[in-house]
Amino acid sequence: MANIPVSTYLLIKLSSRCNLSCTYCYWFRDSTVYETPKLLLSNVENLLVEKLKIHIEKHELKSFNCIFHGGEPMLFGIDRFTSLLNKLNEISSLTGCQIEYSITTNGVLINDEWAALFMKNSVRVAISIDGKNTVHDKYRKTLNGKDSHSQVIRGYNILVETGINPSIIAVCDPLSDAAETLNFFVDDLHCNSFDILPPDLNYSNEIIPISKYYIALFDSWYDNYFDKGVKVRFLVSLIRSVLGLETDTDSFGYGPLHTISLNTNGALEPNDVLRIGGNERTKTTANIETDSLDDVCSEPNWQEAYNSALKLCAQCESCKYNFACGGGHLSHRWSVENGYDNPSVYCEDLKQIFDHVWTRVSNDIFISQTTGDILLSDYLKTV
Ligand code: SF4
Ligand code: SF4
């Protein structure tokens, strides 16, 4: 454990259930999720506050990130969420540690009261919208099979009217029109920071190639929106990674994975997205009742995820893209036969995407004489 950095990211499952039933959702693929409490247990909430304070003091942390997640985290209810934020704010005051809040929501339950609470506590809101209704409603259905787009857009608009600048997280439909989705987010929703991610799949799933989609998306963005400061995280990270710079995504790029997840029953686990490979990928014996936040880092599944993110398979090791790609997202590498010892299921697509991005940006690059930063002409943007 000596070389493992102290975790400053805690993903808190406020709810393990959802009010939508998206066809591609990784969270419900393994039905053991229904064995966990629907909402974060009250005693787990109290222990979270207690153990987080100890963690911050022990490591003298100046900043920490609480990421509220689900299922659908807003099912937790506004009264309990207000109370939790108050307790976390108190820890921040007592320790001097800046605790940043973010929430990922499907947006259906957003109303003026919730929006005001987010605003008051500077909670960054990421709302899941996959594009126009024709794209979004193909996959993101209500529990009784109805379309959810209009409800989600209503929630998004309430946030904007409150003065919040929400980001959007979309899952791409590789067979849809990428430029149309981009235009919808920027021109119709006036969103200037969002992400469009590949579907969460591994070697047990059927894969639809994504290269055509991302190449079209990149071209449309680079030609029309890059200079206007529109940030599509996946695309910015593609540029940064082909230039050998650090990225703020775990979708690809070489680097450790050290987020801790707190489940509603108090279980401390590795990053929840590894559940794409089933509950066995994230199961640990660590629980907030008996263990510290650090203790999860010695659990086999946590160690496997951490080490696998840093140790690439032989094919990736000898690949010319490996410094940019890093084997892709860890969860996309998993197979029953080899665990994480595989290239990404999107390997061939990623190669085509990296080639294309390099071809597009390589002529526009120069080094700033004053700062030494790598810049893209003509607009002096550091990417
Ligand atoms: S809203 Fe999120 S948690 Fe709920 S079903 Fe859809 S993808 Fe899963
Ligand atoms: S492109 Fe394929 S082989 Fe190369 S690093 Fe990425 S996943 Fe591995």
Image (tube, rainbow, N blue to C red):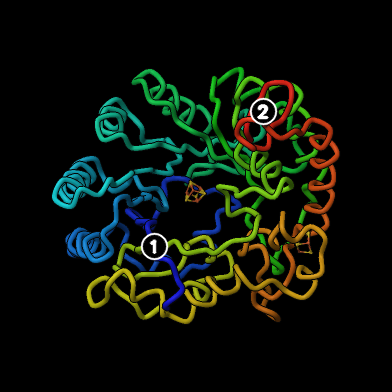
Name the image quarter holding the C terminus: top right
> Residue 265's x, y, as percent?
30, 67
Between disc 1 and disc 2, whose residue precedes?
1
> Residue 360's x, y, as percent?
83, 35
Q: Quadrant of ligand 2?
A: bottom right
* Vertical comparison of 29 with 301: above or below: above
Q: Are marks 1 and 2 in contact (CB under 8 Å)?
A: no
Of tags 1 and 2, which is closer to the observer?
1
Residue at x 81%, y 42% (from the top left corner): 358
Question: Left or right of 215: which side holds 238?
Answer: left
Q: CA distance from mark 1 to mark 2?
A: 34 Å
Q: Residues within 10 Å of mark 1 (few under 14, many from 20)?
A: some
Secondary structure of residue under mark 2 = helix
| Quadrant hosting residue 344 | bottom right
> Residue 101's x, y, as percent?
33, 44
Q: Residues within 10 Å of mark 2 (few under 14, many from 20)?
A: many
Q: Tag on residue 182?
A: 2
Secondary structure of residue under mark 1 = loop
- Location of mark 1 (residue): 7
The amino acid type found where label 1 is placed reads Ser
Question: Left or right of 66: which side holds 280?
Answer: right
